[in-house]
Amino acid sequence: MGNDGGSIPTRRELVKNAARLPTVSELKATALEAQTHAWQNDPVSSDPIDLDNAVSDWRGRLYNYETVLQGLMPGASNGEPHEEKKEKEANDELSLSDTGRDLTFADTGIKSIRDIVRLKGKPYKSASSSETRWQCPVTFKELGPGSKAVYVVPCGHVFSELAVETILPDKLCPECSTSFEPTNIIPILPTDKAELAKLRLRMEALRAEGLRHSLKKDKSSGDKKSKKNKRKAGADEVDGDGKKKNGEHGSADGSADGLVPPPKKKKEKTNGLDSNGIASRINNPMTASLTAKVLAEQEKLQRQRKLAESR
């Protein structure tokens, strides 16, 4: 500012600096910041993640269990998906920018408890920090933003990525001995496009089998299919005019002539007493015959009284 012209940047220099691409170290720092935020905060409620009650969806995102329960409650205000994600959510597309980003519950795509898995990590408290984190029970490595972690479906036990090479040959969870398939090892908060593509293909295969992320059956789709099949079967059997689609005419009640017997008419109750019915319920034959005679006489008297009254 001393009129020497050296301290005032020119317009060309300003534009050149603004258009500079971020360096590799800056990109790594940004990614680590986003990962740290995703590990520590619920993307829907922005509350701190409670590792004792943490859950994950098929994308590997972390949520508080209470957040999912509140979002699934009837009448809950879940919000609308972001405009730029509506089309992506319909096709289950994934984006690297979702990591560390605040979402509405509609953005998560969680529609049932079967869409999440409760995570079971080994608690670990470091000497340098008072925060409770997870520790891999196989490698004893601290899990968090600086290390890659995975969990096993359906049991939900959490391990480090390095432990996968150890537990894969046995295909048994070291914590609970639950069998699993290699495709059911889910990375927590993945950022690699290849990993995200594998998770999407896994969900497409599960949906084709009628399963959810937790490997439980999709009851909602099964109920809809069964109801649809029943309605279709009823429509094929009888049409709206009471006629079968194969050309056979039905009666007024929709049954085909000569194929379905007409419903039996109910016995009309008489004013008199059913002597045979009462006598048949008595085990002693002498008592039964006497009872039948008495009831027959009473019925005869009642008929005589009715005739006298009518005259």
Image: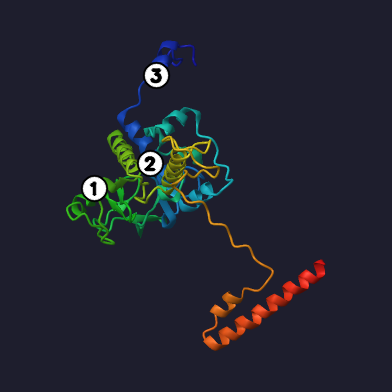
Query: Residue at position x 40%, y 38% from top?
Result: 99
**Pointer 2: what residue?**
35
**Pointer 1: what residue?**
182
Query: Residue at position x 80%, y 71% from top?
Result: 308
Decide if residue 101 is on the left or right side of residue 160: right
Q: Residues within 10 Å of mark 1 (few under 14, many from 20)?
A: few
The kind of residue on which mark 3 rests is Asn
Decide if residue 155 is on the left or right side of residue 222: left
Which element is circle 1 on?
helix
Label at residue 17: 3
The kind of residue on which mark 1 rests is Pro
Q: CA distance from mark 1 to mark 2?
A: 25 Å
Query: Residue at position x 51%, y 51% from top?
Result: 262
The kind of residue on which mark 2 rests is Gln
Q: Position of residue 179 (x, y in %)?
A: 25, 56
Q: Nearer the viewer, mark 1 or mark 2?
A: 1
The colour mode here is rainbow
Q: Position of residue 215 (x, y in %)?
A: 34, 50
The image quadrant that residue 130 belongs to is: bottom left
Decide if residue 166 is on the left or right side of residue 282: left
**Is 70 in front, or is 133?**
70
Q: Answer whether labels 3 and 2 touch (C-beta < 8 Å).
A: no
**Is 260 in front, or is 212?**
260
Residue 294's place in the image compared with 269, above or below, is below
**Is 6 in front, or is 131?**
131
